[in-house]
Amino acid sequence: MGSACSRNRGQVVHEDQLYSVKFSKSGSFKWLLHTLSRSSSDVLRKAQGPGPGRRPSLVELCVARVREDISRYSDFSMLPRDLSQQIFNELVRCSYINEELLGAFRDCALQDICLDEYPGVKDAWMEVIASQGQSLLSVDISCSDVTDSGLNLLKDCSNMQSLACNYCDRISEHGLKTVSGLSNLTSLSLKKCAAVTAEGAKAFAKLVNLVNLDLERCPKIHGGLVHLKGLRKLETLNMRYCNGITDSDMKYLSDFTSLRELQLSCCKISDCGVSYLRGLSKLSHLNLEGCAVTAACLEAISGFTSFPYRAPCC
């Protein structure tokens, strides 16, 4: 179990190493054998998947059996993280997860919780999600009914690298204060989130490791970009359809020297606003569709490296 639980994301472990003879003496492997002892040809066929002659792995067999008899299980915390993660992913894929079943994954040290547009996600689910603690690296609760209280439960998951709360209408400026404490975040997505206002944007100031920030369709962000000034690692910034963004906001982007992609479609930006981007030499993608710019702005970006510039013909 230790060999699986201690490894980092992306570290390759071959299956014959992960489920070695030494490992087979553990309780978690006995759980696997007990699970598979009842496996049938039907489970084998379902786990085998497409491709003639392909033999399913032990993990695939186990996940298939768990999915078939999910009502028999109430606690997956005894399993290696790799296995419990795959079981969780499969149950989400098949839309089996509900509030009761989610409880079986409490304290499983899962790394990734992707519940994007998943029905029924609310504050009660966040307690189990937060129980993954320091192991938790990414969470996607987009289109959920999670409120400030639920989001606040993530405050101790300080190793999180990615968070998506797109279209979460019940999260307010107060809830974003929780996000400010997740200083290891490299990716944050808050599409059409009512919490993203000039005041709420203060939560971004401490996220100095951010590489990707998505604020698409957040019209109340006007005046809040001043709080992004310290995000020197930012490489992609999406503010499409943020129609509150004006030329006065653009000056705060002038220090983003690592910026490679900037989406500003349908913002209230003119040639004057574009002039603030003059020093962003690494910018390789700039989208100004729907903005009131003219050919005069080309002078400001003439020093950029070659990129597929997209701007309206005015």
Image: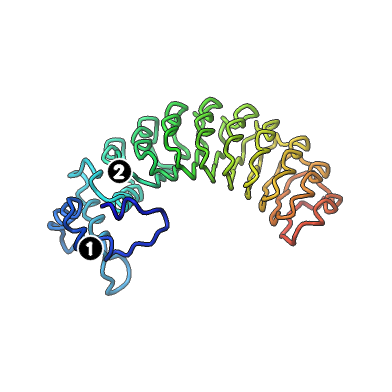
Is residue 215 visible to us here?
A: yes
Q: Position of residue 33 (x, y in %)?
A: 15, 57
The quadrant holding residue 103 is top left
Q: Is residue 125 left or right of residue 294?
A: left
Q: Say how many tags the image has.
A: 2
Up-down: is 203 above or below 284? above
At x 20%, y 51%, the residue is: 28
Looking at the picture, tell me which residue is in the foreground, 151 or 166.
151
At x 36%, y 54%, the residue is: 7
Q: Amino acid at mark 1?
A: Ser
Q: What residue does disc 2 label?
A: 108
Up-down: is 212 above or below 193? below
At x 40%, y 44%, the residue is: 113
Q: Residues within 10 Å of mark 2 (few under 14, many from 20)?
A: many
Q: Is residue 98 left or right of residue 140?
A: left
Which residue lies most toward the bottom here?
53
Q: Amino acid at mark 2?
A: Cys
Looking at the picture, tell me which residue is in the foreground, 40 or 300.
300
At x 78%, y 38%, the residue is: 247
Q: Position of residue 233 (x, y in %)?
A: 62, 47
Q: Is residue 286 left or right of residue 62?
A: right
Q: What residue does disc 1 label?
A: 20
